[in-house]
Image (cartoon, rainbow, N blue to C red):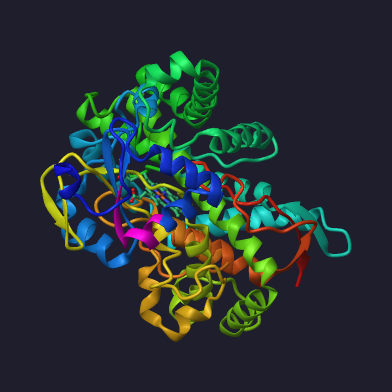
Amino acid sequence: YQKVSRLPPGPVSIPLLGNLPQIIYYLWTTGSVVSTLDLFRKKYGNIFTLWVGPIPHVSIADYDTAHEVFVKNAGKYADKFNPPLFRDLKHDLGVATTNGDHWQEMRRFALQTLRNMGVGKDVMEDKIMEEFNARCADIDKAAVDGVTVSHAAEFFDLTVGSIINSILVGKRFEDNNKQEFLTIKSALDKAFEFISPFDMTVPVWVLKRFFSQHYEKMMKVMTECQDFAANEAVQRYKLFKAGKYVVEKDNVSDYTDAFLLKIQQDGENSDFNLESLKTMLFDLWITGQETTTTTLISGFNQLLLHPEVMEKAREEIMKITNNGSRPLSLSDRSSTPYLNATIGEIQRHASILNINFWRINREPTYMGGHPVDSGAFVAAQLSVLHVNETIFENPQEFNPERFISDEKLLQKVIPFGVGKRSCLGESLARSELYLVSLLGQIHIFVQFFILQIFGNLLLRYNFKPHGKLSTKEVTPYGFAKRPFKLEMKFVKI
Ligand code: HEM
């Protein structure tokens, strides 16, 4: 009772099990993680506590409290709960789930390297456009009477995968290596469907002992994926160690070169060595790849269900590019309010994580006016926050106009999280989305990426469904969301 009084409200919990019985019941009756959390939000308010076994988990489901906690008090919430499964796989290396000095060094180095490589600037825009043009050439080659039918997932996997891979190891996916990539990617997609929030919480010995086949299956996919992502870099590292590869300071062309240059200059240490290079490539490969592709696929599902939105966005882009006589560029973003609003609405609906990564609260404090005890896990639940009807009216509707009538509302869409552990690739992702089609003002990488891809696709093709469309969640109980994998027709304009 005393512990509960030092936490935000929530359902009555049972010793040892906490709220697991209620959580399981509501997962079953509402049909998804997001609707279960949303139900608790409606009952207990925008900040509520659920006990998972003996650990209180505090969920924040509105923008203002998320901002108050993770931005105003950013320094206090830099530490994430590092899921035991990832510790087992990555041995406390990398950037996505680690804490402390190693995390800080890896994050700082990755951001600096991406910046030096021109992410968020013209250089990266050119790289994205080069990849985009190559993919469109493949689509055009396969056209019959100006129409090509393609799986959206394959098109976006290859486009995004190639861009990320060239940034990391300087290699795009072409005819000779694309099949291997697509095979690994498809295994990874399946893994995202069967890895659940449960796997991310329980100790590894529980998985090994009671769910050994499931554990082996998860480890196999992740290890294969890590080997694939790092293969090129490992070969280069071996040449480097044998003195047959030297990095020229003024000619660093990818993340691997930057990492080897650091070793060349300062020698190997606990942060910069082969194992941490491999883990970083895995982290950036997974975080960059899955998230962006998921957003793009989910976006095209929405656009095909709402052709009037696609038409309006295209009209806007046609106008500013003189009827498509030039590609859409990142510098156009301030002239494309409707495209920006559409990408915002796509990201609000896509909200790629059913459950966000938990931070650890180290000292007793107050959040949104409620006491929060030390030792509690805290997270801004982005997927719930984005369907909060007190912020987004009729949240299930796909309606970009909501951001035109209230410009400030777009700031409350936070698909990349907020604070010290927010997405490292944000500006890259935003540009991809825009240039390939729509998104708006994303800070760093991710935003440019997304905008670039979205916008330019709309300039080049009209899109029609081929078969079924659906915005229904494929993995309603998973840790990450998976959109319905649609097929679509690319109709040359
Ligand atoms: C549409 C695309 C993307 C979305 C929606 C997205 C979203 C997110 C979210 C929600 C988080 C967790 C934030 C939190 O814990 O509060 C995150 C973390 C992260 N993202 Fe992204 N992301 C995208 C693309 C990318 C790209 C392209 C990269 C890298 C090239 C990337 C690298 C990372 C990394 C490394 C982290 C962990 C950062 C840390 O813990 O310090 N992301 N992302």
- State which quarter of the image contains the C terminus: bottom right
Report the residue at 63% width, 76% height from top. Answer: 309
- State which quarter of the image contains the N terminus: top left
Residue 310 x %, y %: 65, 74
Report the residue at 45% width, 64% height from top. Answer: 387
User: Is residue 45 in the magenta section?
Assistant: yes
Report the residue at 42% width, 43% height from top. Answer: 22
Kindly tell me whether residue 239 is visible in this rendering. Answer: yes
Q: Nearer the viewer, residue 116 or 61?
A: 61
User: Is residue 440 in the magenta section?
Assistant: no
Report the residue at 72% width, 56% height from top. Answer: 137
For residue 307, above or below residue 249: below
Classify residue 2 by image quadrant: top left
For residue 218, above or below residue 391: above
**Residue most toward the left?**
364
**Residue most toward the top?**
209
Residue 343 x %, y %: 51, 68
Q: Nearer the viewer, residue 185 or 77?
A: 77
Classify residue 56 by image quadrant: top left
- Tell me the magenta residue range: 40-49
Q: Nearer the viewer, residue 408 or 433?
A: 408
Residue 54 x %, y %: 27, 33
Is residue 435 shown left or right of residue 68? right
For residue 399, above or below residue 356: below
Is residue 190 shown left or right of residue 404? right
Total marks drawn? 0
Residue 383 x %, y %: 44, 56
